[in-house]
Amino acid sequence: MSVKTLKRIIKELDEIKKGVEDIEDGEKETKIQDVVIENLLEMHLEDLIRRNISKIFPDFEIIDGGRHYYTKNGNYLDILCKDRKDGSLVVIELKRDRSPSKALIQLLDYVNQVMEEFGTEMVKGILICQKTDRRMESALNAIRKKLKNPDDISLVEFDLKFVAQLR
């Protein structure tokens, strides 16, 4: 595990600690468990996509070395790929539950950072999330109308199901 990854984990744990300081003692453990489970779900989703990238996006090649790509601004991209068809870079942002409209803004920011860092306008963005809402769809449509290639910003919805059966 890299030093940057450890720093990110420590930062996230500090944020969790701050977030539960005002919660009564009996509820803190539950809140922390919820956050850990949510992070594990996103890590699992990322692992699934990385292992199956050629099935999900046949023209993409992951170029981040199997780890989050850190931008010069200190942000980390979930997955950074290259599109073999046209040579463009592709930022894939994963959201297990966060507001889709906020996630779209985050994706656009990351796309812009990659454009600046790599000195290219050939950068696409894909947001993979569980749900969209009317506001998200409206914002995405407005952005696409302004782009030379409307498919440069894409949305993929997923549905994870957990089925348990007692026997």
Image (tube, rainbow, N blue to C red):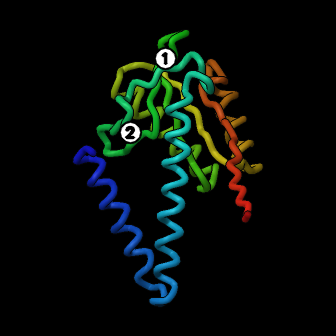
Determine crowd level at label 1: few under 14, some 14-19, many 20+ residues with C-alpha closer than 10 A.
Answer: some
In the rendered image, which quarter is residue 149 located in?
top right
Q: Position of residue 55 (x, y in %)?
A: 61, 24
Give the structural element (helix, strand or loop) at label 2.
loop
Give the structural element (helix, strand or loop) at label 1.
loop
Residue depicted at x 70% and y 60%: 164
The kind of residue on which mark 2 rests is His
Q: Toward the viewer: 146 or 54?
A: 54
* Residue topped by disc 1: 88
Residue depicted at x 48% and y 85%: 23
Q: Position of residue 110 (x, y in %)?
A: 45, 38
In the rendered image, which quarter is residue 119 located in?
top left
* Residue topped by disc 2: 68
First in residue order: circle 2 vs circle 1: 2
Q: Toward the viewer: 120 or 18?
A: 18
Quadrant location of the N terminus? top left
**Looking at the image, how many numbered discs can be counted on the residues?**
2
Q: Mark 2 or mark 1, which is nearer to you?
A: 2
Residue depicted at x 38% and y 75%: 18
Contact (CB < 8 A) between labels 2 and 1?
Answer: no
